[in-house]
Amino acid sequence: MSSTGEKPGKGTYYCKKCGQQVVLDDYDDTLPPCPKCSHTEYGK
Ligand SMILES: [Zn+2]
C-alpha cells in the first residue's frame, strides 16, 4: 500500500476508497491526494 506524499515509483495506483486510477510516470513523482475523493491511500 502507498500513501499520498510517497514516491512509490512508476506505475498505476488505485485509490483504496473509490478506485480512481492514478498513474505515476516518473520515479520522482509523489502520489497526490485522490483527484476524485481526496483519499490518501492507494493500492496497486
Ligand atoms: Zn478516491
Image (cartoon, rainbow, N blue to C red):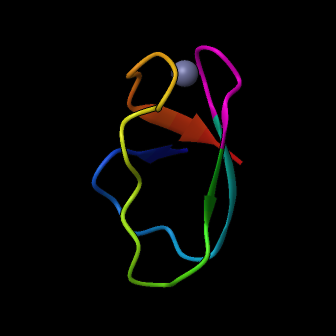
Q: Is 31 within the magenta?
A: no
> How many tags in the picture?
0
Please indicate whether residue 6 sits to the left or right of residue 15 in the image. left
Residue 17 in picture, x, y percent from top left: 58, 15
Query: Which is nearer the eye, 41 or 32?
Result: 32
Figure quadrant of residue 12: bottom right
Residue farthest to the left, as pictured: 5
Residue 10 in picture, x, y percent from top left: 62, 76
Which residue: 38% across, 31% down?
40
Q: Is 19 within the magenta?
A: yes
In the displayed structure, would residue 28 be above or below residue 34? below
In the displayed structure, would residue 30 be above or below residue 19? below
Which residue: 67% across, 29% down?
20
Please indicate whether residue 17 sits to the left or right of residue 14 in the image. left
Please indicate whether residue 37 sits to the left or right of residue 19 in the image. left
Residue 22 in picture, x, y percent from top left: 62, 48
Figure quadrant of residue 31: bottom left
Residue stretch rendered in magenta on the structure: 15-21
Classify the position of ligand 1 by quadrant: top left, top right, bottom left or bottom right.
top right
- Magenta-highlighted stretch: main secondary structure? loop
